[in-house]
Image (cartoon, grey):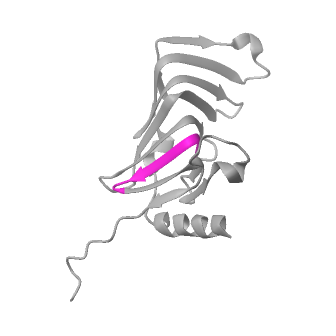
């Protein structure tokens, strides 16, 4: 019941207000790293796997993911699936039509260009302005504006002594309120 309440609170908090920059999906994916390898020998059909290590920066439009290592897979249709790992992986993306960004941090980030989805694993944190959610796992669907935050107890993993979901929602501007 507590998980349901927290998920409803997070959905209410982010619903209708978080939309990824729509033009990002039409932009090319750029990668920078200290080293890169393309493992064509492991290819089945036209799938390609590339591994980038050392200060990796993945960008697509306003989306930016920084990590120690990124494994990029591309399917037959050209969709890309990136798994970014590191001591702390970060992502940042501009909200559509606004001068505001969504930012996130975790130990592992998975980015799926086909489904327009980002997943944060292990000590996950997501921030918009001064509002913030934390948990062991955060799923962010860029199309439906849906967030799901799960603590480590729910996932059946132990990531540390503080394994609950935390949400901080700042009060709305009270300047126009009549007292």
Q: Please give the count of numbered marks on the rendered protein.
A: 0
- Measuring from the top left, give residue 163's x and y in whole percent: 60, 49
Q: Which residue corresponds to the image point at 44% horizontal and 47% vertical from the top-left?
A: 23
Q: Check if residue 58 falls in the magenta segment.
A: no
Would you say the magenta stretch is mainly helix, strand or loop? strand
Chain part drawn in magenta: 118-130
Residue 146: name its quadrant.
Answer: bottom right
Q: Which residue corresponds to the image point at 60% horizontal and 57% vertical from the top-left?
A: 148
Residue 73: name its quadrant.
Answer: top right
Taking depth in this image into account, of 22 and 32 the one nearest to the observer is: 32
Farthest residue to the right: give it.
44
Taking depth in this image into account, of 83 and 137 the one nearest to the observer is: 137
Work out which quarter of the rendered image holds the C terminus and state it. bottom left
Taking depth in this image into account, of 88 and 62 the one nearest to the observer is: 88
- Measuring from the top left, give residue 165's x and y in whole percent: 56, 56
- Residue 32 appears in the picture as rendered: no
- Measuring from the top left, give residue 46's x and y in whole percent: 73, 23
Vertical relation: 89 (above or below) 160: above
Taking depth in this image into account, of 60 and 27 the one nearest to the observer is: 60
Q: Which residue corresponds to the image point at 46% horizontal and 36% vertical from the top-left?
A: 90
Q: Check if residue 119 falls in the magenta segment.
A: yes
- Residue 102 appears in the picture as rendered: yes
């Amino acid at each position: 019941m507590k998980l349901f309440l927290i998920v409803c609170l997070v959905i209410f908090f982010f619903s209708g207000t978080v939309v990824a920059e729509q033009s990002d999906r039409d932009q090319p994916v750029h990668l920078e790293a200290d080293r890169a390898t393309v493992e064509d020998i492991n290819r089945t059909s036209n799938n390609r796997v590339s591994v980038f290590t050392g200060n990796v920066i993945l960008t697509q439009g306003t989306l930016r993911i920084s990590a120690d290592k990124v494994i990029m897979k591309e399917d037959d249709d050209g969709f890309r699936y990136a798994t970014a790992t590191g001591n702390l992986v970060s992502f940042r993306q501009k909200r559509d039509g606004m001068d505001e960004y969504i930012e996130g941090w975790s130990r592992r980030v998975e980015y799926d260009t086909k489904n327009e989805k980002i997943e944060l694993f292990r000590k996950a944190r997501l921030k918009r302005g001064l509002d913030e959610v934390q948990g062991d796992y955060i799923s962010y669907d860029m199309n439906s504006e849906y967030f799901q935050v799960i603590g480590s107890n729910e996932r059946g993993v132990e990531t540390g002594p503080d394994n609950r979901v935390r949400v901080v929602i700042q009060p709305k501007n009270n300047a126009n309120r009549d007292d």
